[in-house]
């Protein structure tokens, strides 16, 4: 059972493999199944933003909110999909900015 799992593009996967992380490059349409499989196998799941953008929002939210396994978003190597700005979202929710 791998400690960590990376789901993303081939370039990112190659880098993560160099440090001993198990990787998978899901094809279009298999992202949700790949996420479920990774969450069943590892204690930490690193999910590129490009792959995360192709997963159902409710399913992705459940995975990110779960304590175990810890699921985190990482930037995709192409930079096409930005990481969410959590600090800005929290400031808006607290009424500190419009």
Image (cartoon, rainbow, N blue to C red):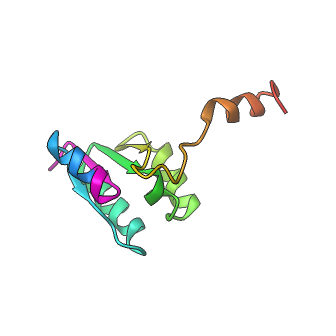
Would you place residue 83 above or below residue 9 in this image? above
Residue 8 located left or right of residue 84 = left
Asked if 61 appears above or below 44 in the picture, the reply is below
Which of 1 and 89 lies nearest the eye of the viewer?
89
Residue 89: x, y in percent?
69, 36
> What is the residue that sits farthest to the top in this orientation?
96
Horizontal and vertical percent position of residue 84: 58, 42
- Residue in view at x 52 percent, y 59 percent: 53
Residue at 61 percent across and 37 percent down: it is: 85
User: Could you tell me which residue is drawn at 23 percent across and 45 percent down?
Assistant: 15
Of 64 and 10, nearer the camera is 10
Q: Quadrant of residue 40?
A: bottom left
Q: Is residue 93 magenta?
A: no
Magenta region, residue range:
1-12
Corner quadrant of residue 10: bottom left
Q: Is residue 8 magenta?
A: yes
Q: Position of residue 47 (x, y in %)?
A: 39, 50
């Amino acid at each position: 059972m791998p400690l960590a799992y990376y789901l993303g593009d081939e370039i990112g996967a190659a880098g993560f493999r160099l440090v001993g992380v198990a990787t998978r490059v899901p094809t279009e349409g298999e992202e949700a199944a790949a996420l479920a499989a990774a969450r069943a196998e590892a204690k930490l799941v690193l999910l590129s933003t490009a792959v995360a953008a192709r997963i159902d929002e409710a399913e992705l939210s459940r995975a990110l909110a779960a304590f175990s396994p810890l699921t985190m978003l990482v930037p995709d190597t192409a930079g096409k999909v930005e990481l969410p700005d959590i600090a800005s979202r929290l400031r808006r929710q607290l009424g500190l900015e419009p």
